[in-house]
Image (cartoon, rainbow, N blue to C red):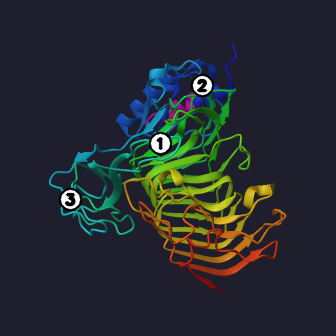
Amino acid sequence: MKISALFISCAFAAMANAQDFVTYEEFGAVGDGKTDDQKAIIAAHEAANKKGLPVRACDGKTYYIGKGTATAEICTDVDFGTASFVIDDHEVPIGKRTAAIFRIAPSAKPIAIKGLTTLASCQANIGVSLPGPCLVEVVDSTVRQYIRYGLNQNNGTPKREVFLAAADGTVDPATPIVWDYGKVTHAVARPLDAKTLVIKGGRFTTIANQAESKYTYYGRGFSVNRSNVRIEGLRHDITGEGDHGAPYGGFISIAFSANVMVTNCIFTAHKTYRTIGAAGKPVSMGSYDLSVNNSVNVSFVNCRQTTDINDNRYWGLLGSNYCKNMLYDGCAFSRFDAHMGVANATIRNSELGYMGINAIGFGTFLVENTTVRCGSFFNLRNDYGSTWRGDFIVRNCTFVPRNGKKATGTLVNGSSTDWHDFGYPCHMPRRIVVDGLKIDDSNHPDKYDGPFVFGMFNSKNTSADYVEKFPYHVTEEVVLKNVKTASGKKLVLSPNKHMFRNVKVVRE
């Protein structure tokens, strides 16, 4: 009987380094791409967690994960190396579809905070002692916000946010409290892990589910619920997508975490399917390979996607909610998206495709040395009130409207749905500063006066007779410096001259 050199090297490595790291083979994994190795993988991580040892996959092997619904808890470093993992979603029980394959777990449990009854926006100290540096979550369940408008309408969610605080209760000024809380009904502190946990390598392939195209999200990937994590060199591919399927909530799903970096990784966008939305009408259904929720200081560095960032058959790669300080650096993705708010975001040295930059939020949104190929450079999501309470800064960027289709490009677009209560006052960016922007509007319509700074926003708000039910706060100042267009046309303020009549425009 012949025994492969690969098996021998992996087995001897495991024996020789029995006290140094744990392998899946020690717990019965076969790695032939056919045998279901999920139980062995789970057992290996359980043992590694107890001993405080890292885990190493065997280079060149393929670990198959079938319809099992248990999760491997990761509490130590992992080196997947050049190993492959096949995650087969064909026969996963529908009631277990959200179970993660791997969960990067925190070293300490969440702690309920006692005595925190109110909070004010920008409050410097919460007045409560903590066990150490923590990610703090606060909720006021008596107030609802992000009351969504449109085809996926809903009745909103309780007011909430996360921020970092020191042991003495001092709030990290880089993650300030955004809202006023007349009542805090829920407060939890999640201690920050002192050591950075590193997940390296691995090629993961998801065999896509064949479920009905409804909002029954699958979550069979990595769930990150720990602070101070670095994921590097991972690749995720998708195969087996047909003409229908249930959506995914993120192969990497980051939640209630701080200081997470995803670097030198490759992801794949999912096909866009259609379903019936909450308003009873057909809608395009979102599906994500990356998801970030209730987290701060999350960065994606030197990452890209396998699918064409300009191919509209595939949904945008990332979705996020309730985050602070998000970063793209050196990425090529189909979009950036902040659904229910981001406080401070930066995109630099990147390229964004047909879905562009979609944002709701606060603070400063900085975009520099980046190319955006979309109908608008910034899109303020109208289903959440097209609101950004803060500033936009654009430096040394390129804007290609529609990427080949005849179109009038718009720097900032959205919709003033001022008859709908979103649960908060709605704002446009207070100040927009553009310093270095090339607009490739060479493929413009025949009748063309130039690209716009702002879209129409409200086709009814065109005269002094119009009365807003819920006032929409328009931008105060726009600074335009070193702006060049391929057409030679200047940026036009807006087709809605009345609505933006009081905006101060400085051209340098």
Residue on which the image places disc 1: 153
As helix, strand or loop, the secondary structure at mark 1 comes to: loop
Q: Residues within 10 Å of mark 3 (few under 14, many from 20)?
A: some
Q: Nearer the viewer, mark 2 or mark 3?
A: 3
Residue on which the image places disc 3: 118
Marks 2 and 3, how far apart in space?
45 Å
Looking at this view, name the residue that lies furthest to the top: 1
Q: Nearer the viewer, residue 159 or 40?
A: 159
Residue 455 visible to the viewer: yes
The picture quadrant where one finds residue 415 is bottom right
Q: Position of residue 378 (x, y in %)?
A: 60, 62
Q: Nearer the viewer, residue 101 or 450?
A: 450
Residue on which the image places disc 2: 209
The N terminus sits in image quarter? top right
As helix, strand or loop, the secondary structure at mark 3 comes to: loop
Q: Which amino acid does label 2 sit on?
A: Asn
Going from the N terminus, do you reach mark 1 or mark 3 first?
A: 3
